[in-house]
Image (spheres, coloured by chain):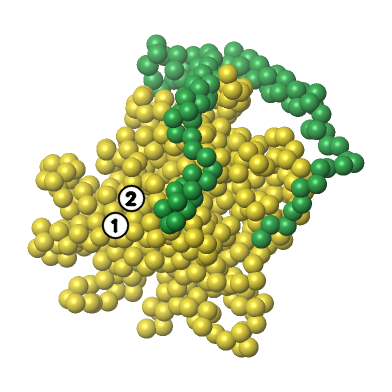
Amino acid sequence: MAHHDHRTPRGKRYWLDSKRNVAKVFYALIAIDVLWLAADFFYKKKAEFEGLGGWADGGIGFYPVYGFVGAFLLVLAAKQMRRVLMRPEDYYDREERSGSS
Amino acid sequence: MLEFLLSPPLLLMLGSVALAAAPRSVLPRSVLRALLLALPAWSLWRFWGLDLGNHLQFDLFGQTLTLMRIDGLSRIFVVIFHLAALIGSIYSFYVKDNFQPLVGLFYAGSALGVVLAGDLWTLFLFWEVAAVSSALLVWVRRDGRALAAGLRYLGMQMVSGVLLLAGIVLLRHELGAAPGWAEFRNLTGLLEDGGLGFSNLAPTLILLAFGLKAAFPLLHSWLIDAYPESTPAGAVFLSAFTTKFAIYALARAFPGQSELIWIGGLMTAFPIFFAVIENDLRRVLAYSMTNQLGFMVVGIGIGTELAINGAVAHAFADILFKGLLFMAMGAVLYRVGHVNGSDLGGLYKSMPITTGLCIVGAASISAFPLFSAFATKSLIMSAAAHEHYFWLWLVLLFASAGVFHHAGIKIPFFAFFHHDSGIRCKEAPRSMLVAMVLAAAASMAIGLFPLAEAAFGLPNPFYELLPYPVDYEVYTATHVITQSQLLFFSAPGLRHP
């Protein structure tokens, strides 16, 4: 099924092969974030909730803070889960083999 | 009789059997493939000419069965199931063997039977046919793992069937007559006096039967287990039908069932933790599917017109963008031989078109403005906000950021970018690319229609398909800015501490 080889690429270098360019992508993302945050100061949101003192969906910076903290905590929690749950790739295959032998 | 045979469910099922039985000397591969595409296209064209209401009723064992009942809710599922059958068939032409598209077409026919069924007995019949035909699509990979996973899968599907049958029989006993359309379309109504539980066993069993196929928490493991074990094409067909006709059945029978709100909320949140740590990228997509189904279940539980529209619209969009992501990962599996995230990377150099199409799928599922989920998931989010479910809304918002992590970033990043694994392979076969382009174009169209409507007053054919009239503005400054903020700010938050 697979039609590939694992030769080390030679010759052509792509733009993303440079670590400096990868850093540029990250900094561009930060710049975009700053622009989106600034947008909050130029329009009035329509709030649906009283929750969190009306900040939840009516205040400045709620979505950026919630997005950043939520994603941060998600990865943090998943890293702890990985310690408990992670098994080798062939974990169940090994059990099957030892069970059948 | 001919009208029965030409109904969408039977046309696809019997048509695929006839094509499979025809000798190759009579039906060369190219003609067979043309017919594989012509069948669903013709079926959809015929369906479009039918009026709303009951069609093809007949008496069996003293009961009147209705093969087709068309209304706003069933119609949109019929449309998307035909499109999914077409796209899946095109995708599967990368293999010479036509067994997969033939089984896929048969399975699509049974799924159409479920969403068109005008009574619970007809629903049960197609429910079971879909279980068996979909198991074949797990087994088509023809190795030990797929065989074992397919058996486990079939076992769980049969449990759903038994629960459904027990619920229907009990309902018949309690009513003293065969449950009709009135009972089917609103099993919630039967629950008003006692809620779910032993006091209302019949509807509770039916809800569990539907919930098992909709991957409710603790009933979801078959999905994570079986779908990633299928072939590239098999997984595309599988991702389209079973879970979505379960969503249809829930929307039909249990709109506004309040328990569904919290069941759905849980479904949106818990899979994202597992998706973060999973390495098999097609298994990540299976977790992602549970997460997206959660949004739909929430919408059904809220039960307002806006929420039901949202659930149905999101089911439609999910078939396209999840199918697209499964197709992209299937292309990687086909070319590289595995989809282990830690062993891939740098494939954008070898598969640039697949990379681009995968990014469209990733943007669609993440609900970026201009892409499909922005115009579908927002209906559910807004319905939750309008009904003042504050904590639920926070959970859905968190789950939205989580979707962006595992499906929006992780899938394309680990497969195509990340560090260069040194793997060099060919671009995906042409049939795969054509199918992916169609799914990507449809995903973008769903996201762009509301913008064209707001900007130029053009009609929105997608919203017109929804069961209820849509009075909702997608592209407001608040929606575009807040959704972009949520997604763009969650990206740096995902950098490991």
Chain letter behind tag 2: B
Estimate the x, y position of residue A38 in percent, counting from the top left: 63, 15
Q: Is residue B451 left or right of residue B313?
A: right
Q: Quadrant of residue B481?
A: top right
Position of B160 relative to B411 (above/below)? below
Q: Which mark is residue B159?
A: 1
Placement of the N terminus of chain A among the 4 image quadrants:
bottom right
Residue at point 46%, 66% (across, down): B136
Instruction: Look at the picture and state if A33 lies above or below B355.
Output: above
**Chain letter for the part of the structure drawn in yellow:** B
Q: Estimate the spatial distance between the alpha carbons at disc 1 and disc 2, rounded to whole Å.
A: 8 Å
> What is the x, y in percent for residue A41?
59, 13
- For the point 37% across and 28% down, the residue is B392
Q: Position of residue B420 (x, y in %)?
A: 75, 38
For badge 1, the amino acid type reads: Val
Mark 2, residue position: B212
x, y (%) of residue B405? 56, 32
The chain drawn in green is A
- Please state, as top left, top right, bottom left or bottom right, where the C terminus of chain A lies in the image: bottom left
Viewer can see residue B88 = yes
Q: Is residue B364 visible?
A: no
Q: Earlier in the sequence, mark 1 or mark 2?
A: 1
Question: For this view, does A32 lie left or right of residue B236?
Answer: right
Residue B133, by quadrant, is bottom left
Q: Tag 1's secondary structure?
A: helix
**Residue at the extreme front of the image, as rendered:** A101
Q: Nearer the viewer, mark 1 or mark 2?
A: 1
Q: Are marks 1 and 2 in contact (CB under 8 Å)?
A: yes
Q: Specify the amino acid type for callout 2.
A: Leu
Dot 1 alpha-carbon crowd within 10 angstroms: few under 14, some 14 to 19, many 20 or more: some
